[in-house]
Amino acid sequence: MASVKQRLSGTWQAKVRRLGFPDQSKTFARKTDAEAWARAVEREMDVGSFVSRNKAENTTFGEAVDRYLAEVVPKFRAQRQPTSMLLKLKERFGEYSLVAIQPSMLAAYRDERLRAVGPQTVTHELGLVNRVFKACQLDWGIPLPQGIPTAGIRKPKLPPGRDRRLEGDEEAILLRSLGQLGTPWMKAAFVLAVETAARRSELLSLAWQEVDLTRRVARIRGVDGRATKNDQRYRDVPLSTRAVATLAQLPRSTTGRVLPITADALDSAWDRLIARCRREHVHGVLTRKLEEQGIDAAREIRALVYKKRAPLDMTLKLLAEVERMEIRFLDLHWHDLRHEAVSRLAERLQMHELMKVTGQKTAKMVARYYHPRAEDLAAKLG
């Protein structure tokens, strides 16, 4: 039975009471709206499609995110990225109730974000929205009358998988630059990444007590010693001669870890290293082109670096040409070293052996990281 009464404040409160259903009530500014809502609720009860909106209307997305961060994210192997993304999503949608978030809102957010970041990032963000709503519905007993809003939008089209490998003398230059750093950790991390195909988190969790240089085996674990990304408690990885030599030369840290650096420190150092190598390479090529034009290259490079005077127009023209044509050290990410490692190991190991080393569960996943060079395949043909 439905009833509509005016409150002292002048608003209208609609109530619906029916046996077998929880009491429903909602306040409206106009009586006609209250009556229309009551009729809609009774109609849903009549046809058996009624789902209570109370919890979803009284729970904001921000509150759901806070609970998800407190109860669910701590169980993730990697927590930094999802935490950062969830906090940004909370800034955008935190004040909306769960029922107020519509597919059209998420579609607009998707399109806006695609103008600033890549489709993979947007897909991850929408995936987290989906997870929060699923937790509300499946774990926390919050019915969603309109369903999960992400089901009503198209996901961004993902680009082809990365196939970046070390090219030419990139590895030699990187090793030389890494050797000039004040500590040995970054150079060792680079060599171990290329030799073992271990993920960054796995390398940074590697402990000396789980490295056997005599047997040439290292036991790889996930973040903080937990399970790996593929839910393996650990995996034993064979060490190449180069990996053993690198480990043998490392000083022992009091932390017990092979590489006593943080993920943030590694990322920052890698970004600075790549930027420096790219700049030095571009300036080296530019120097040769300027000298071919009879221009004082050293003077022009100083103008570009210190910006105390404007470079010549010819210098700027040649610089633009070099930056467009030269791909050395361009778009080289740390995770690309795993692609490099898998591609190298695939030349020496069988598929089942390679999967044991990399921790990948399917041949399809291995194929995503295996990028043979055409000239190498041609050499095998003879």
Image (cartoon, rainbow, N blue to C red):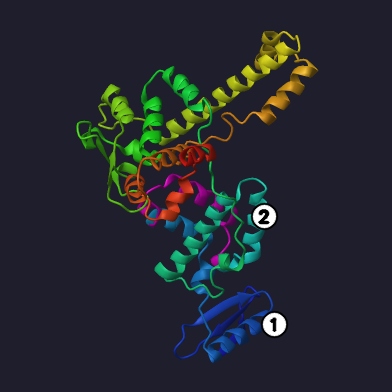
Q: Residues within 10 Å of mark 1 (few under 14, many from 20)?
A: few
Name the residue type under label 1: Thr
Vertical relation: 192 (above or below) 46: above
Where does residue 136 sit, x and y in percent of width and height? Answer: 45, 66
Left or right position of 81 against 205? right
Residue at 46 percent across and 91 percent down: it is 19
- Chief SS of the magenta region: helix
Decide if residue 72 is in sight here. yes
Where does the magenta region start and end?
72-98
- Circle 2 residue: 111
Q: Nearer the viewer, residue 18 or 130?
A: 130
Is there a contact, CB below 8 Å, between mark 2 and mark 1? no
- Circle 1 residue: 32
Where does residue 67 sit, x and y in percent of width and height? Answer: 43, 58
Vertical relation: 155 (above or below) 379: below
Q: Looking at the image, is mark 2 or mark 1 earlier in the sequence?
A: 1
Q: CA distance from mark 2 to mark 1?
A: 37 Å
Location of the N terminus by quadrant is bottom right
Name the quadrant containing residue 105: bottom right
Name the residue type under label 2: Asp
Name the quadrant containing residue 12: bottom right
Left or right position of 178 against 102? left
Circle 2 — which element?
helix
Name the quadrant containing residue 253: top left
90 magenta-colored: yes
